[in-house]
Amino acid sequence: MQIETFLEEHNQPKYRLNQFYQAYYQKLITDFDQLTVWPKSLRDQAAKQISLLSLKPIKTQVSKDQDTIKVLFSRQHAPEQLLEAVLMKHQDNRNTVCVSCMIGCPMNCAFCATGNMGFIANLNADEIVEQVLFFARELAKTQQKITNIVFMGMGEPMINLTATQESIAILTDKNKLAMSPSRITVSTCGVITPLKKFIMEGYKGRLAISLHAPNQELREKIMPVAKANPLPKLFKTIDLYTKKTNKRVSYEYILIKEVNDQIEHAQQLVLLLKYKLAHVNLIPYNPVSNQSWQRPERKAVYAFAQILKEANIAYTIRVTMGQDIAAACGQLATSKQS
Ligand code: SF4
């Protein structure tokens, strides 16, 4: 049962709801007993009818450098269904949570461990937000806060659009988590129809596109989504976002040795992005156990980046975090043993 319905059914005044929001989203309570501004009888009733925790943490892994924490959760109502979320503590004091919006993923991108799991289930908005709350509670123990949220974990947000939109509404609601939309990044592999809807319905956060190939032919080979969502049409949709928000778009580009890391690929990427408000995130490939692909040599990564630099295209080479605990980009796949 939803808290809103519960309070209505118990004929409670409106301010009780705000008291709950403040306690749950800002004071980060996990139990109705901690909601001491409510009368005890109401707390007891609520505890009987509503569970505040829809996910259960079952395993935590911390990288050697302590900067990345990956948590495996099970769903309370379907404990066999597992998902992962990651906290990245950056040198500049940013604390970024990478959330999952699905268990598994139907998009089947060839380089991605989640895609290799297949699709298991969509998460709902509360389950997405709860990943954030979990890490917020952990950080609060050392007086730290979450500064950024990226929808880059398991799943494709545009295929679970309602939950994605509802979770963003909770994260940015002034009475709930009150995050600035510009601290939220949604990453998509480019499913055009829902992406257009998402943009037209007023998404104000940042947008990242999993591009990974600079031409249609190669993109179709490594990302099945590309077939029904060709690059020219995808870029038209991305242009809508730029027009509406005037924000730069991030293009994620996983560099895979001898697949998409050649000079000609960099040159094609320049042609695609030259007149766009764009930033390229170059991500040297993180090995996934059942794939034979390799990470390119350092010098190939820098040669690729140099072409972008000469064309005045902004880029970063992503510092890979959490590779030793399989928490890096493309590596999330649930396994209790991993
Ligand atoms: S990269 Fe994203 S969209 Fe592609 S399979 Fe992995 S999780 Fe799904």
Image (cartoon, rainbow, N blue to C red):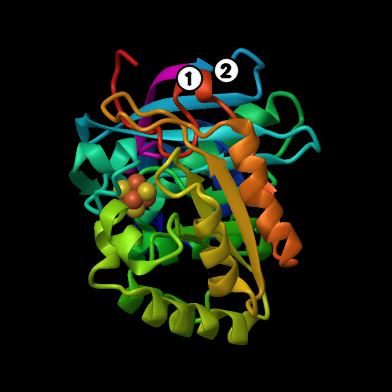
Amino acid type assigned to the residue bearing label 1 in the image: Ile
Q: Can residue 47 be seen in the rendering of this structure?
A: yes
Within the magenta stretch, is there residue 59? yes
Under circle 1, the secondary element is: helix
Q: Residue at x 46, y 78 (%)?
A: 235
Residue 25 horizontal side relative to residue 30, left or right: right
Q: Nearer the viewer, residue 121 or 53?
A: 121
**In which image quadrant can residue 74 be found?**
top left
Q: Residue at the location (70% across, 65% down)?
A: 313
Asked whether residue 16 is in view, the answer is no
Q: Residue at x 51, y 49 (%)?
A: 262
The image quarter containing residue 8 is bottom left
Binning the other alpha carbons within 10 Å of mark 2 as few (below 14), some (14 to 19) or many (20 upward) gives some
Q: Number of marks in the image?
A: 2
Q: What amino acid does circle 2 point to?
A: Ser
For ligand 1, tell me if the residue under mark 2 lies within 8 Å.
no
Residue 90 location (% of width, % of height):
72, 34
Side (left or right) of 222 relative to 62: left
Badge 2 element: loop
Asked if residue 82 lies in the magenta stretch, the reply is no
Q: Which residue is mark 1?
A: 325
Residue 105: give x, y in percent of width and height.
26, 48
Residue 273 appears left or right of 104: right
Circles 1 and 2 in contact, beta carbons < 8 Å: yes
Q: Would you say 338 lies left or right of 69 here?
A: left
Q: Sequence-wise, which precedes: disc 1 or disc 2?
A: 2
**The residue stretch that appears in magenta:** 49-60
Report the front residue among 31 and 289: 289
Q: Which of the pair 106/288 is nearer the observer? A: 288
Q: Position of residue 245 (x, y in %)?
A: 64, 80
Image quarter in which the C terminus is found: top left
Residue topped by disc 2: 63
